[in-house]
């Protein structure tokens, strides 16, 4: 009789442990996935900020006429290095202040001179984490935007002969 009761108590204890483990995992697994998603979002925003900063730096160095091409090359490199969760880096704008920078630069031909101002580059990135988009946007990727402004000074060469 004692052995039979002992075996029954042991089975009950094992079943109770299994139920506790199952309930614990049902709570713990979603929490871990949400933390993973939040980490992916934070990393994605940081990568977008770094890409925007590098694109603005590239746009501010050199001839303002080709600034957009230099910034686009940085964004294209970010797209090549991106993962499936971080995709579609997009150069949304390259703007100059004053807005007449390229006209001023072209007006300096053939004698050359200095053109200065600021360049602002804007980028966006789509982030596709596992759970968070389904909660907030019905499965659509989360889109984040970044903008960086850098000063520039360009000296147009004297091409007069």
Image (spheres, grey):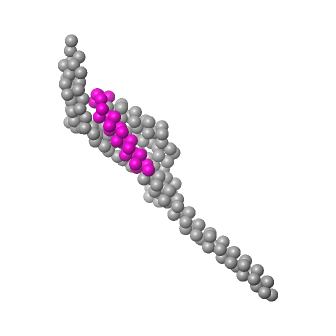
Q: Is 90 in front, or is 152?
A: 152
Q: Residue furthest top?
A: 161
**Residue 76 at least partly seen:** yes
Residue 63 position (above or below residue 134):
above
Name the residue located 20 percent from the left edge and 28 percent from the top edge.
114
- The kind of secondary structure the magenta stretch mainly shows is helix
- Residue 160: image location, x then y, percent: 20, 15
| Quarter of the figure with residue 2 | bottom right
**Residue 138 at least partly seen:** no
Q: Is residue 133 left or right of residue 98?
A: right
* Magenta stretch: includes residue 16: no
Q: Is residue 19 left or right of residue 54?
A: right
Q: Residue furthest bottom?
A: 1
* Magenta stretch: includes residue 54: yes
- Which residues make up the magenta segment? 43-66
- Residue 94: image location, x then y, percent: 31, 37
| Quarter of the figure with residue 120 | top left
- Residue 12: image location, x then y, percent: 70, 79
Q: Is 91 in front, or is 112?
A: 112
- Residue 69: image location, x then y, percent: 36, 31
Q: Is residue 53 left or right of residue 118?
A: right
Residue 72 position (above or below residue 139):
above
Viewport quadrant of the C terminus? top left
Residue 16 position (above or below residue 105):
below
Viewport quadrant of the N terminus? bottom right
Name the residue located 48 percent from the left edge and 56 percent from the top edge.
37
Q: Is 30 in front, or is 92?
A: 30
Name the residue located 28 percent from the left edge and 41 percent from the top edge.
149
């Amino acid at each position: 009789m004692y052995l039979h009761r002992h075996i029954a108590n042991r089975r009950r204890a094992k079943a109770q442990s299994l139920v506790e483990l199952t309930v614990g995992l049902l709570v713990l697994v979603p929490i871990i996935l949400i933390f993973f998603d939040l980490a992916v979002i934070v990393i994605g925003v940081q990568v977008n900020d770094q890409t925007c900063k590098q694109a603005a730096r590239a746009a501010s160095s050199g001839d303002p006429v080709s600034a957009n091409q230099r910034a686009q090359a940085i964004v294209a490199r970010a797209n090549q290095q991106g993962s499936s969760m971080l995709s579609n880096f997009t150069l949304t704008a390259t703007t100059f202040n004053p807005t007449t920078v390229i006209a001023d630069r072209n007006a300096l031909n053939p004698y050359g001179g200095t053109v200065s101002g600021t360049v602002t580059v804007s980028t966006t990135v789509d982030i596709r984490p596992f759970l968070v988009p389904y909660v907030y946007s019905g499965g659509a990727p989360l889109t984040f935007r970044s903008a960086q402004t850098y000063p520039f000074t360009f000296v147009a060469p004297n091409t007069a002969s």
